[in-house]
Image (spheres, rainbow, N blue to C red):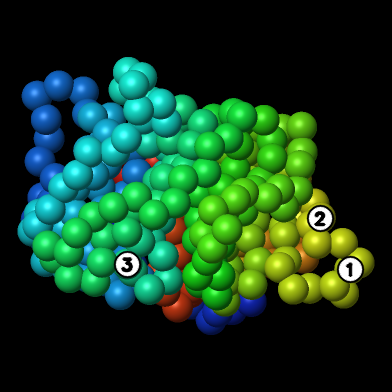
Amino acid sequence: NRYQRPPTTQRALGGAAAALMQIRHLRTIYAPQETIAKVTAICWSQNNRRLAIVTTDRVVHLCDENGDRRDKFSTKPADSKGAKTYVVRGMCWSPDSTKLAIAQSDNIVFVYKLGTEWGDKKSICNKFPQSSSVTCICWPEQRPNEIVFGLHEGKVKVGQLRSNKPATLYATDSYVVSCAANREGTAVISGHIDHRIYRFAFDDASRGVAHWELCRHSCVPYALSWGEAVCAAGTDQTVCFYDKDGSVLQRFDYSRDETEKEFTCAAFNPSGETVVVGSFKRFRI
């Protein structure tokens, strides 16, 4: 299949030029099921050796770099005696690729220690129960012992692995729909249902505050990622790029395309120069 990469400015995406990209289907990694089995989260490990996939059946499938399924395990409910009615809202690997953090709708984040090799013993090494549903999660590159996650109640928290205790980074009164870390792992952003995007810097005291409103997006920023620029998209079929201070770099409006649906996810490549944005039956690069 051929997908159109929209024209970009050098400032927006690190000098990427307008081009056509050839995307070729290589193989099906996870075959369609006979029943409804939406893929609710998928993520590559930092060393590019493992791919984690989870659907509404709450079973995590682990594939190798070739897409072959090598292992799987069932997630656990927050209440060990409770029914499995939760949904996995997000997953992310640790920077050293040995742990997998799983955000669940039943008010908890579990961290599984999976080891470095296939067949290593799996165990839960941390868990962070919350007072409301966990909605999104990310693991900053330079924070190997800190996981950032958002909550239904509007708080953005950090789970500290060494103490096994969570702490609030900042609180808002708006449902957190997405979060992402920058490539350096020194800051995170969060998208909220009131269209706002907030930025939090771990070690930046230049503003006198740790977090601030980066910008107010044109819709709910369900698709949010951070590379050379911040990419945000959502239900209005518009993809927008912001700089680190919230100024608009570039905007691409696909609302006139009757075949386009809302954007639901976005991810930059490791260099931060190219981003893929996903919508219904389509990727845009």
Q: Which mark is residue 212?
A: 2
**Marks 2/3: CA–CA distance:** 32 Å
Q: Secondary structure at mark 2?
A: strand
User: Which residue was labeled with disc 1?
Assistant: 207
* Quadrant of the frame with the N terminus: bottom left
Residue at x 51%, y 31% (from the top left corner)? 107
Q: Nearer the viewer, residue 234 or 140?
A: 140
Q: Nearer the viewer, residue 29 or 159?
A: 159
Q: Nearer the viewer, residue 71 or 1?
A: 71
* Kind of residue sitting beneath label 1: Arg
**Marks 1/2: CA–CA distance:** 9 Å
Q: Position of residue 193 (x, y in %)?
A: 65, 33
Residue 150 visible at all: yes
Report the number of numbered marks: 3
Quick one: label 1 or label 2, which is nearer the N terminus? 1
Quick one: label 2 or label 3, which is nearer the N terminus? 3
Quick one: label 3 or label 1, which is nearer the N terminus? 3
Residue 277 visible at all: no
Residue at x 52%, y 43% (from the top left corner)? 128
Q: Which mark is residue 16?
A: none
* Quadrant of the frame with the C terminus: bottom left
Residues marked 1 and 2 touching at CB (< 8 Å): yes
Q: Secondary structure at mark 1?
A: loop
* Kind of residue sitting beneath label 3: Thr
Q: Position of residue 31 (x, y in %)?
A: 10, 41
User: Which residue was labeled with disc 3?
Assistant: 98
